[in-house]
Amino acid sequence: MKKLLVILGAGSSVGLRLPSVATIDALMQGWAAAWPQPNLGQEDYYAAVERGMRAYIASSTASNQHRSVNFETILGDLAALANWVTPAPHGTTLQGLTGKANLGLQFPAGRYGAAVAVNDQLTMLLVQLAKHMRGQSQAIDAASQPAADYAALLDGLRRRFDVGIYNLNYDTAALTAWPGAFTGFDANGGFSPRDVHGRQDWGFIYHLHGSVHHSLSNVFGYPIVWKDDLSAGFDDGEPHRSTGRVSDGKEMPKTTLVAGGFKLDQLLVEPFHSFQASLIRHAHEADAVLIGGYGFGDTHVNRALSSRLERGTGQDRPPAMILGYAGRGTDSIHFRRDDWVWNMTQTLLTDGHFFSEAGYGPSPADPCELAQRRAFDLADVHKTAIWYGGFEQAAARVDDIAAWLDGSSNDVLRASRP
């Protein structure tokens, strides 16, 4: 069987009532606001970073900035702040060249007071995120129609392909739909890197950025283990725990999730290190690519995809299908200049001007109308198609999607009949 590489982002699970990025943005703001203890010299560093980031971006006169402000980007700058305020010999050595900036923030006293405070808030936010996603995963109704459609979509793909999934989400939506998939962990919950790297078969779901099933195994943090029972006790990290040293002297909190900036540094911990390595291998082995609900915001994932696509021309280039959602007012991809279009076209080595409705001429297509008619936007020259009707709703056309990914003509992507 041909091999299908699947990349799942946050949009693939919102139909199962898992939180969107916008929802997590709001949750983060609430968690961050409740954390400071002013009597200890703390303040809300997350909010300060967000204000600074928005002001910085707003100061630009560039017509297309291609930079988002969300919980991921804010956590990234929060991690950078923690390393900036860490005293010598660790932390950011550029302080020695620029002089310690007047950050205008309140920090606890002591040589390491600032670094500890910022890292504590960062750790708390990551722990809260893990706990929240675990609770949301436990609430998934496997008998609901969206869950049934999700499972039908994966089943339809698996009938035609040997499927491998890289899940960028922390939740259990994919595992609920495909409970027998290999996760990289053994029956005792230990990670098995030799099995991951030596595995010839696909049939896996790898959680590249962490899972609600992950738990730190001891008071020192690592290794990460897998727990099937989500009601069991989990250790997602805790403030005041020692941080882990990564590249160039930087330090990062020890938690079960990969989120925010410096993701390549965070991926140095197992199982993420092995999963990132195997992603690159699987990208080059793949005969086709399916991308569901992904915002193309992770450079390490994007580069794995673009590296494969740029080495494939004509028949050697694997077809790529995006399963996304377009609501009322979503403009044609011809005219959009937002982050998603920019990052998507850079990753898949295409351009919005090449897209038109499958089976019709080169005229720009309205995404909302395509979604209503269950049709596809298609860049034929680059073998790239987009479905705007929602992730699990694509189950209605899974046979056509699988056929096109398997090499069938573009005719299978014409609008479906009522």
Image (cartoon, rainbow, N blue to C red):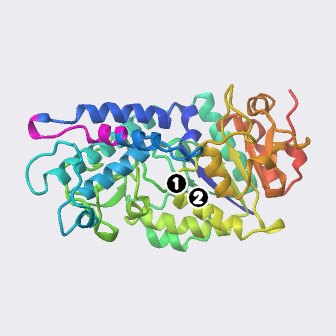
Label 1 CA crowd tier, 10 Å (few <14, some 14–19, many 20+): some
Residue 128 appearing in the image: yes
For the residue labelled by badge 2, is the local secondary structure a helix, a strand or a loop?
helix
Residue where numbered disc 1 is placed: 298
Q: Marks 1 and 2: in contact by CB < 8 Å? A: yes
From what the image shows, is residue 194 above or below residue 40?
A: below
From what the image shows, is residue 181 above or below residue 285?
A: above
Report the side of 360 relative to 372 (left or right).
right
The majority secondary structure of the magenta stretch comes to: helix
Label 2 CA crowd tier, 10 Å (few <14, some 14–19, many 20+): some
From mark 2 to mark 1, how far is it between C-alphas? 6 Å
For the residue pair 334 and 348, the one nearer the viewer reads as 334
For the residue labelled by badge 1, is the local secondary structure a helix, a strand or a loop?
loop
Disc 2 residue type?
Answer: Asn
Percent across and percent down for residue 376 are: 79, 40
Residue where numbered disc 2 is placed: 302
Residue found 91% across the figure and 42% down from its top: 361
**Quarter containing the N terminus:** bottom right
Q: What's drawn in magenta, residue-wise?
A: 39-51
